[in-house]
Image (cartoon, rainbow, N blue to C red):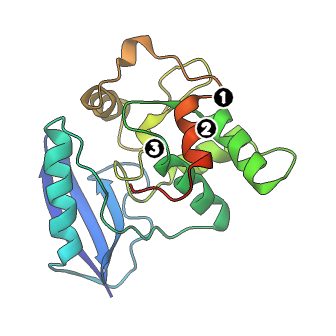
Amino acid sequence: MQYVCRYRSPLGGITLAGEGECLTGLWFDGQNYFAATLSSEYREGVLPVFDETMAWLELYFQGRDPGTVPLLRPSGSPFRLAVWEMLRRIPRGEVVSYGWIASEIAREKGSGRVSARAVGGAVGHNPISILIPCHRVVGRSGSLTGYAGGIERKIRLLSLEGVDPENLRTPPPHCKTMESRRSGGPERR
């Protein structure tokens, strides 16, 4: 059984969904694909993961690094899950492009090519906003592109992390921080 609760953020209302010890959804009220992965049968309720998530969000919206995210269990196709896992690797305060994610997934799978457009579709359907940081993905030239929660929220989220949305440039494909995370074994998030 999934449970939901509401959180009031500086960027508007947020609906949290969870099951057991895991967060399964986090959507800005009214965003595209709102509650798309929420089961048809759910209840308002209280779960420890909701308290953990709200404490994390409080620190985040204060501009502080909230540290390790609560346990997450997004629901989606294997491809979407791979994209969302890649999003979780993007360090706070950094951005990458859809094309960069596509090339990394292709490299990890050992396959020839992954479409940046397909990556964009998976990013747009991310069911756990902010904690799976889809707002850190920009266009090839650093342009701000769509965000299911709205472009204004994307700008504010990036600003909270110290990114200047007016002067974005994506890192080169050999970005050191991503390269070191790739070879450094398991990481805490």
Q: Nearer the viewer, residue 154 or 64?
A: 64
N-terminal of the two: label 3 or label 1?
A: 3
Which residue corresponds to mark 3? Answer: 134
User: Residue 101 at what x, y percent from top left?
Assistant: 64, 41
Residue 146 relative to residue 176: left or right: left
- Residue 115, position as x, y percentages in the image: 75, 42
Residue at image point 43% right, 39% down: 91
Height in image: 145 above or below 185?
above
What residue does disc 1 label?
A: 174
Screen quadrant of the N terminus: bottom left
On screen, residue 100 above or below 55: above
Does the CB distance between marks 1 and 2 fall below 8 Å?
Answer: yes
Query: Is residue 111 positioned above or below 137 on the image?
Result: below
Q: Relative to residue 162, is residue 13 drawn left or right?
A: left
Spatial distance from mark 1 to mark 2, Cα to Cα? 7 Å
Q: Give the secondary structure at mark 1.
A: loop
Which structural element holds mark 3? helix
Q: Secondary structure at mark 2?
A: helix
Determine if residue 147 is in view. no
State the mark number for residue 179: 2
Image point 19% across, 51% down: which residue?
57
Residue in the picture at 37% in, 51% down: 129
| Badge 1 amino acid | His
Q: Label 2 sits on what residue type?
A: Glu
Residue at position x 15%, y 46% in the image: 59
Horizontally, residue 25 falls left or right of residue 110, namely left
